[in-house]
Image (cartoon, coloured by chain):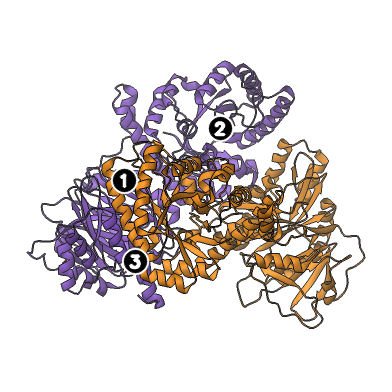
Chain colours: A purple, B orange
Amino acid sequence: MRTSIATVCLSGTLDQKLVAAHEAGFDGVEIFEPDLVASPDSPETIRTRAEELGLSLDLYQPFRDFEGVGPDLLERNLRRAAAKFTLMNRLGIETMLLCSNVATARSGDEQLAAAQLRELGDLAERFGVRVAYEALAWGRFVDSYEQAARIVRLTDHPRVGVCLDSFHILSKGHNPEAIETIPADKIFFVQLADAPLLSMDVLSWSRHHRLFPGEGGFELGAFMGHLVRTGYDGPISLEIFNDTFRQSDPRATAVEARRSLRWLEHETALWLGASPGARAARMSASALPAVEPPAEVNYLELRADAVDDMRALLSQLGFHAHGRHRTKAVELWSQGAARIIVGRPESDRPQPTVAGIGLSVVSPETAMRRATELFAPEILRRESAGDEPLVGVRAPDGSEVFFGAEGETEPNWVHEFGAPAGEDTPVIQRVDHVNLAQPWQHFDAGVLFFHSVLDLRAQPSLEVAAPVGLVRSQVLRSADGVIRIALNLVPSGADPDAILPQHIAFAASDVLGLARTARERGFRPLDIPANYYDDIAARYDIDPALLSELKELNVMYDRDESGEFLHFYTPPIGTVFLEVVERRDGYDGYGALNAPVRLAAQYQQRRVATEGVSA
Amino acid sequence: MRTSIATVCLSGTLDQKLVAAHEAGFDGVEIFEPDLVASPDSPETIRTRAEELGLSLDLYQPFRDFEGVGPDLLERNLRRAAAKFTLMNRLGIETMLLCSNVATARSGDEQLAAAQLRELGDLAERFGVRVAYEALAWGRFVDSYEQAARIVRLTDHPRVGVCLDSFHILSKGHNPEAIETIPADKIFFVQLADAPLLSMDVLSWSRHHRLFPGEGGFELGAFMGHLVRTGYDGPISLEIFNDTFRQSDPRATAVEARRSLRWLEHETALWLGASPGARAARMSASALPAVEPPAEVNYLELRADAVDDMRALLSQLGFHAHGRHRTKAVELWSQGAARIIVGRPESDRPQPTVAGIGLSVVSPETAMRRATELFAPEILRRESAGDEPLVGVRAPDGSEVFFGAEGETEPNWVHEFGAPAGEDTPVIQRVDHVNLAQPWQHFDAGVLFFHSVLDLRAQPSLEVAAPVGLVRSQVLRSADGVIRIALNLVPSGADPDAILPQHIAFAASDVLGLARTARERGFRPLDIPANYYDDIAARYDIDPALLSELKELNVMYDRDESGEFLHFYTPPIGTVFLEVVERRDGYDGYGALNAPVRLAAQYQQRRVATEGVSA
């Protein structure tokens, strides 16, 4: 797959954009006209610069409002086009994107449009360039790719073909199957974009909310499959208008973009896998190494200054202290299959408090190969002699994902810490889910990372009201539900410490019993207001004895079609806190209705602690 | 007008919300259920607290999914309602909001709904409370206020009436005129919200984008006019779901909210003004003092550390130095009617660089009375003996607006500075427009402030692409176009210094001549890339001689239906820069197409200056 990216996807100057595309390994770029117009570099300088960077300049875009006009305007439009063709010659760009007319078309007559495109084709021929005609989803008369393809067929000019853009096709719900009816030599260019499935006017949706493939809700594997079947072998280019990407480091965005295309190649191969034939066989080489679903979260790593407080808390919850690692300044606590590595923050770089996730997989090597093929940066870790080798990659939020081999009972590396676990029957059995704070620039990149690298599936995104703003939260989970990672986005204006977007939830067999035992050990849970218990009493028929026990122990409650959910929270330690959950009868949620109450309780507790407000 | 506000409009804990509503002078509040559930205070404590603060608790909300259900669910719904009525008794709240069923209704039969509401009315009677039934815009069967009113009429129960919410009515384009057909004693509650005119699904629009009256596009004066004609005299309450307000200081939001209602009273009086009768006469007492359109911007005040650079720049542009104020550490520069007061930043508080705007009005006293009736904070200024008294208020962005009396030729205070202006014919004639940076929390508040206090009208909002993100920009202008203020919002993640959202534009009679003269005086304009001139040459038929002069002088060009626009920019001084514009033949825009090129040129210049990138 020849990969390309439109300069509009990246922030900064045109030169910064070219460098970012080059560093991420793109083959080429589309030059977005406003980037060129605003550049202090001449077209010749830009051409040379791209050559130096090994980037082809694949497309000049956009040219607007050409066809379907009266004769006077046609003359002016041809003059405009000649000026741009001259510029393209200076840049060395062969293909120009022509968008279907949104403003000046007076007629939807396809013969008229074709006749005018033929004149444009003749002009293009004189300059040695060609025109890729694209139906905008909001075109005045032409708003579907089938119409555009029909007009191109009528035009019947070697310099005029179509440009296919997945957004304009899928946003309108058009079936991409008819792409297969377009001759490959008439597909001059292909632009790809994903998007969340929003219900809003398509122009705003397109201009602000596009995403890289794998980050939204479009079925791009099928789109690409139809395209591959035509025999098209030109560039596959990303054109993503997104308000966040415009503000983010262009180098990080470009890597995310490359990852999305690599993932899409894989999806396309899977989609084509069902169909026999040479083409499908060729594409299957593009599939990524398969990741067996992780069997468990084999550890989580917490980095916090308040190590003593964390020790006390884990101890109250019944965790066993294994002691310090034989060479590293971290210690292990475990209960059942829940293993927490605790240490102080490392000083060499900013680090989330939930700093690492260890996953047990069938083959760590395969998992790493998949991750690095997806451009995930490998973590180079200094192992001491005799330490179990751990391999891992860094997620966009800065947290680390390590892959370990599935063991019989517990991972081999556990023996690098002191004493083995005790013999008690554990109440806490394993990690249920983990919540990671995502920086606002990298939320969608986080979704793509976990989706593509670990094959986790994005659940519908939620918005949870905290006293200082709405928190966006999206769960990604493995098909079997063993791995559940919630990505949380703190609103841009809010103090992250007032929201605590990172936490670890443990699955327990008996939350009420554990809450009681922990209390005997001195544990004080997060205080839940009495009004909450009045509210759930009104909402559900809860056994009064259970209700009063929940209230006494500050345990929260939820229910879905299949079962019940009981859970309690610890007070925060620094910027992180812990949760213990019990899923009864296959309850499959996360107590989303309770989240605002928990957030308010944490906010209140923080005010008491930091501002001396009376409790 | 009895004023009320839903606690969901404000951030923080329930107690913080009550305090904010009280401090802003509201008569009452609606208790939004999640705020109560999350509060550590008991219902009795909340009741007492509200009494202490002089706030009535006007509404408990929302109760959902009651009517149109089968008999089993009806039983459960009545039990749920009884629990909430009990709670309302503890809070001392008389009215509960019931939203039309969105989830569990099985039938749209209005007789069935009425029969079930009658049962709810009987139950309410036992608790001494009442139910205000509201049609949600996305209700399953009931989604219009006329339907809700019809069902209430069928219910025919003294404890059941309607709640009218302007959002649910106007978002669907329903005509509010039929409000007049509802008996006043059946209107139990009224909620008001404005909103931008977006085209998106109504649920998301409602949950995230509501605005205070005067900040959006709904015609709320007419809505209120119809309401007043019914004889309704209950609370007028604001229910605004807005992602930004959720993150902002609740005290500032509450003041903004009060301002919006005061403005709305005025709009209502104006709307009713045309209709004779006692009611209209009573309402006309609610009209605000009228502001005569300001005759001119009589000065702008700039606060910057680089005073010497600013002096040099003003001098190059032909401004005359009057000298220092006789008592204050500021100096005056003028040309024609453009007057710039320059000083270093004052240390006692954060201050925008464009720190103040002086406006000439017929009666400064009337303008002040209007502003303070709209809760604009008055600025207390230490005047020295003999200084012209200036009165003014502070805008939400921290800038100051001063009102001065219109003079024959120039304001009286000019004589408090040194030398009078020279005799040359000025090329710069006056201030054309001024751009003010708005903090993200206060953008909509800024629109409301300038709209309500100065009667400026909001133009359609624009988004301008800068290399580091999209800048939102909204012009507010007086009817005659003399006062033009653009409010700019820097994207939340961007460094404001990379965008420079504040600047002053002067109107000149001959921009090309001035650019040339200034150059002779050593002026170097912001460098505009050559590619820009190729682009405008392709876009417009420009006389080649003019084009080459524009290019030589770094003057930008735009055109609208009536005329042409020529303008150039100075380099930035600190966080501000200046612009000189020439409007030919009634051109009425701001060169919006040129703004991205200007932003990129400024970004490039800054990289050269701060990072040593080669120019």
At x 69%, y 40%, the residue is B535
Q: Residue furthest right?
A: B423
Q: CA distance from mark 1 to mark 3?
A: 36 Å
Q: Are marks 2 and 1 on the same chain?
A: yes
Foreground: disc 2 or disc 1: 2
Q: Is residue A244 something that shows in the picture?
A: no
Q: CA distance from mark 3 to mark 2?
A: 47 Å
What's the residue type where badge 3 is placed? Answer: Ala
Q: Which quadrant of the view contains residue B36?
A: bottom left
Quarter of the image that includes the N terminus of chain A = top left
Q: Chain of mark 1?
A: A
Q: Identify the disc placed on residue A453.
A: 1
Marks 2,1: beta carbons within 8 A = no
Image position, residue B434 (x, y; %): 71, 58
Q: Are marks 3 and 2 on the same chain?
A: yes
Marks 3,2: beta carbons within 8 A = no
Residue holding disc 3? A601
Q: Identify the disc placed on residue A138.
A: 2
**B456 and A43: which is toward the camera:** B456
